[in-house]
Image: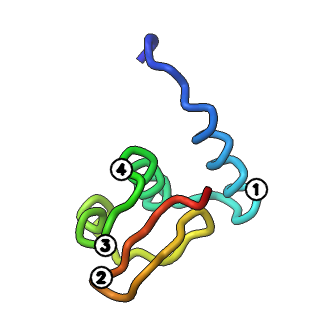
């Protein structure tokens, strides 16, 4: 990890969300990390990562409903 490049924009976004919402649950961090890499994910693609139903979070935009919902990072 010593050679890894820090993603300062992602870190800044996480810190801003923590300031707004208090601490972020690990599930939220997992989802945000996946969205950072893949930009848009449907529920079926990331629910297995957190093993829980996903609720709208402050940094995530939901479009669509139920199984057809797609989530993306707010820009």
Which of the two labelled residues, at mark 4 and mark 2, occupies the earlier sequence position? 4
Residue shown at the point (30%, 63%) measured from the top left: 46
| Of pointers 3 and 2, the one earlier in the residue sequence | 3
Q: Residue at x 39, y 44 (%)?
A: 37
Per the rendering, the mark at residue 38 is 4
- Name the element at disc 4: helix
**Rounded to the nearest whole Å, what is the CA distance between mark 3 and mark 4?**
13 Å
Residue 74 to residue 12: above or below: below
**Image quadrant assignment for residue 6:** top right
- Left or right, 7 with respect to 15, comes to left
Residue to which mark 2 is pinned:
68
- Residue placed under numbered mark 1 in the picture: 19
Mark before the other along the chain sequence, 1 or 2: 1
Place of residue 41 in the rendered image (x, y in percent of width and height, measured from the top left): 34, 63
Mark 2 neighbour class, 10 Å CA radius: few under 14, some 14 to 19, many 20 or more: few
Residue in the image at 41% along x and 53% along y: 39
Q: CA distance from mark 3 to mark 1?
A: 26 Å
Which element type, helix, strand or loop, lies under badge 3?
Answer: helix
Image quarter in which the C terminus is found: bottom right
Residue 10 coordinates in the image, percent (x, y): 58, 41
Query: Marks 1 and 2, Cα distance to the nearest angstrom?
Result: 31 Å
Task: Give the CA separation, mark 4 to mark 2.
Answer: 17 Å
Instruction: State the residue lying farthest toward the right.
Output: 19
Labels 3 and 4: the sequence-earlier one: 4
Q: Is residue 6 left or right of residue 31?
A: right
What label does residue 3 carry, if any? none
In the rendered view, would you say 29 is above or below 72? above
What numbered label is drawn on residue 43? 3
Looking at the rendered structure, the secondary structure element under dot 2 is: helix
In this rendered view, identify the residue nearer to me: 30 or 10. Answer: 10
């Amino acid at each position: 990890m010593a050679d890894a490049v820090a993603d300062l924009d992602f870190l800044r976004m996480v810190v801003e969300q923590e300031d707004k919402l208090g601490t972020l649950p690990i599930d939220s961090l997992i989802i945000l990390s996946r969205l950072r890499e893949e930009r848009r994910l449907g529920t079926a693609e990331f629910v297995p990562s957190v093993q829980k139903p996903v609720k709208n979070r402050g940094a995530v935009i939901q479009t669509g409903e139920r199984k057809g919902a797609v989530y993306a990072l707010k820009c």
